[in-house]
Image (cartoon, rainbow, N blue to C red):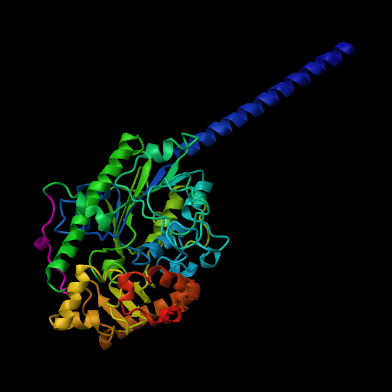
Amino acid sequence: MKKQYSYFAVRILCVLMLATAFVACNQKEKATKKTKETAKKPNILWVVAEDLSPFMGAYGDSINKGHTPVIDKLAAEGVLFKRAYATAPVCSAARSALITGVYQTTTGTHNHRSSRFTDGEIVPEELRIHLPEEMKTIPELMKEAGYFTFNSGKDDYNFDYDRRALYDVGTKEDYKAGMNGWQGNHAIDFMTVKEYVWNARKDKNQPWFGQVQIMGGKKDAKYVREGEKLATNDVPLPPYFPNIKSQREAWTTHYNANRGSDVTLEKVIKQLEADGELENTIIFFFSDHGSPTSLRHKQFCYEGGLLVPLIIKGDNPVLKAGTVRNDLVSLLDVSATTLALGNAKMPSYLVGQDLFSNDYQEKEYVIGARDRCDYTIDKIRTVVSEEYRYIKNYFPERPMMQAGYRDNKKIVTDFRKLHEEGKLTPYQEQHWFGVRPVEELYDLKKDPNQMNNLALNTEYSEVLLKHRNVLENWIKETGDKGQFPEDAKQLEATYNMWKDRPRFKNAKINPEYDQFKK
């Protein structure tokens, strides 16, 4: 009996040992599989150009054809979107939408540079705009999906946040106490992946999601390749501008900025290649909104303010080289597509779609919105369709040339001088200094400059009504917070930030600020 007991004990012990070994082996296999799966995930990089309209060879621009070779090559090797639109024609509102995947008008982040205080100081609680509790930013969702996150450029989000919750590493000023609101423009000329990733990650196989800022329309004109800089008279001026030197220079500068952005993008790509990261990285190249160098584009809802470049390239079956897409796309689709490519959670509140999903539905319309920009109070909504752009001006009595942040620039001072001297064309006089129409409607194919307003043409009454209804339904469905006046505390903070600056003190500012004058 004793021997039998020993025999069975040995048998049981052996079974237990084998089971333990099997479990350990299985766990190790699962861990290895998980590591491999993590390693297989692509890195995803947003190269965000500031204020850049698509005056590029890949977009059919005859002046810059052959002078944006890096951008054109990226497009040839990836997917080019011909009709991608920002949700706002100004930085902070557009970026607040992009980083959440939700319209800025829904989250209450639609007024430019709100939820702010003095630069470098903690924003008081009463001025902080909070996102809904269940809402997370794209970087936070990517972190949950196993990504290391970084940002080597500005944030410019109009809501309260701790930057450390979004990004594992970024600029040198990341770790101030109480990070929230404006995080400055820390754009760099190129990105070193090792600096932002390798020296900070514990797991060297961890995929990363990064944002790198290039200066685009703001400063990239200075990087034009030698011998390729356009002269002032090399670029025809649109007829809605007066043909004067300052306007020609501003317009030409933006063409040069496209050439300079090509140089900057080349640096980013070469750095990825040098760090051995290019092959496993999906690159999104786009701008936050259109050109800043000329009036009527940045801060306004014409094509020049909202149409942006968008190219996506990477080693993924859905990113078929040489694909050109002409369907209407919103930058909110960039938010959703990023999460999809990273196999991250796709919250139900996302407005955009995965651009490469089998279930993707082409849009009939894309909506854009402009609200207060710096201290200039305005409200404009727009709907773009395949053929038309519809614009509604809620403050038509406030002219296009009402007081604004560019008032000291020659493009404005020269313009005002011509107005005072009566030297503008009838169209220019009315368009820039007259009462604006409540509604505007343009045929984008027949009238690319958007100068012939069809809103009062009875032949287009059905088209007008259709676009008007789309906008009205969108306002209701998305809870557009632009329907209501801006919070008085936010407005007072804006007034206090600007009140001592000469261009503000000497300007005919909006009457909403009268309540704060002493």
Front-most of 375 and 66? 375
Residue 17 in the image: above or below residue 456: above
- Residues drawn in magenta: 228-241
Question: Could you tell me residue 120's position as x and y percent?
Answer: 44, 56
**Total of numbered circles in the picture?**
0
Q: Residue at x 19, y 82 (%)?
A: 429
Question: Could you tell me residue 322's position as x and y percent?
Answer: 26, 50
Front-most of 291 and 326? 291
Residue 93 in sight here: yes
Residue 76 in the image: above or below residue 97: above
In the displayed structure, does residue 47 sit left or right of residue 55?
Answer: right
Q: Residue at x 16, y 68 (%)?
A: 247
Question: Could you tell me residue 21's position as x and y percent?
Answer: 66, 24
> Magenta: predominant secondary structure element?
loop
Question: Could you tell me residue 518's position as x and y percent?
Answer: 44, 80
Q: Residue at x 12, y 81 (%)?
A: 423
Residue 460 occupies quadrant = bottom left
